[in-house]
Image: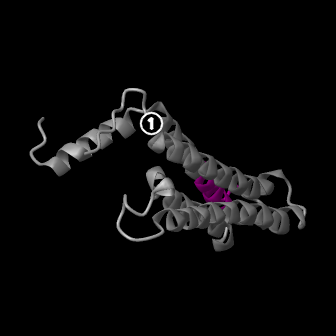
Amino acid sequence: MQASTPQEHWYTLAAQRHTSCPLTTTDGLQFSIALFVFIDAATFSKSNLNGSEFHVNFVDWIPGIFSVLGMLIINSIDKSRLSADNFSYSGDGVAWKARVVLFMGFAAMAGGLAGSVTVCLLKYVVREASWPALWFGVANIASNALIMLSSVVLWVSQNMEDDYTYNLAL
C-alpha cells in the first residue's frame, strides 16, 4: 500500500522502524506483565479467597498512576531535542526545556517506585501481614519497577540510531 501524502509516508516509515525493533516488543511485554501483576493482586484482595483484613485500596493505586504518568512524559520526549540548538527548533532553550520535562518524568517514576515501597512498608510490613496479604505490597513494588524498566527500554529503543538509517538534511 502506497502512502498518498508526505505525512502518511513519514508515519508509515516511523511505524515500521519502531515496531520492528525487538526492544519495543520487550517493552510491551514488561509493561503488560507489570499491569497483570498488580491487577492480579488487586482482584485477589477483593475476592473471597482473601481471608485477611488487608485489601488493595486507592492508596495502592497512586504509585502506579505516578509511574505511568512518568512513562508517558518520558516517552513523549524525542532524544534529538535534548541536544537541540536554538536553530533546529522554534524558540529558545529547547534542549533545556526538554531536559526539565525529562527530569520531571523520571522524578514521577522514581516517586511512584518510592511510593510503592512506602505503601508496602507502612501498610503491610509494619502491620505484620502474612504472605498472601503481603503479596499486595510486593506486587505493587514489582509492577512499578517493571513500569520503570519498560519506560527506559522503550525510550532507548525508540531513540537509538540504526546502522542502516540515513539522516538527510537539506
Q: Position of residue 80 (x, y in %)?
A: 45, 51
Location of the C terminus by quadrant is top left
Residue at x 84% of width, y 69% of height? 122
Q: Residues within 10 Å of mark 1 (few under 14, many from 20)?
A: few
Vertical order, 107 against 143 (above or below): below
Q: Position of residue 157 (x, y in %)?
A: 49, 40
Residue at x 89% of width, y 67% of height? 127
Q: Main structural element of the magenta stretch: helix, strand or loop? A: helix
Q: Left or right: 103 with respect to 169? A: right
Q: Is residue 48 magenta?
A: yes
Location of the N terminus by quadrant is top left
Q: Left or right: 92 with respect to 69? A: left
Colouring rule applied to residues: one colour
Q: Left or right: 135 with respect to 36? A: right
Q: Position of residue 107 (x, y in %)?
A: 65, 65
Q: Is residue 22 magenta?
A: no
Residue at x 77% of width, y 66% of height? 119
Q: Exactly how many numbered labels are in the figure?
A: 1
Specify the quadrant of the image occupied by residue 21.
top left
- Amino acid beneath label 1: Glu
Vertical order, 163 against 168 (above or below): above
Vertical order, 65 against 39 (above or below): below
Q: Tell which residue pokes out farthest to the left in this image.
A: 4
Would you say residue 157 is visible in this rendering?
yes
Q: Which residues are magenta?
A: 37-49
Would you say residue 46 is visible in this rendering?
no
Along the viewing direction, whichever of 128 and 119 lies nearer the viewer: 119
Residue matched to label 1: 161
Along the viewing direction, whichever of 100 and 132 lies nearer the viewer: 100
For label 1, the SS is loop
Q: Position of residue 120 (x, y in %)?
A: 79, 62
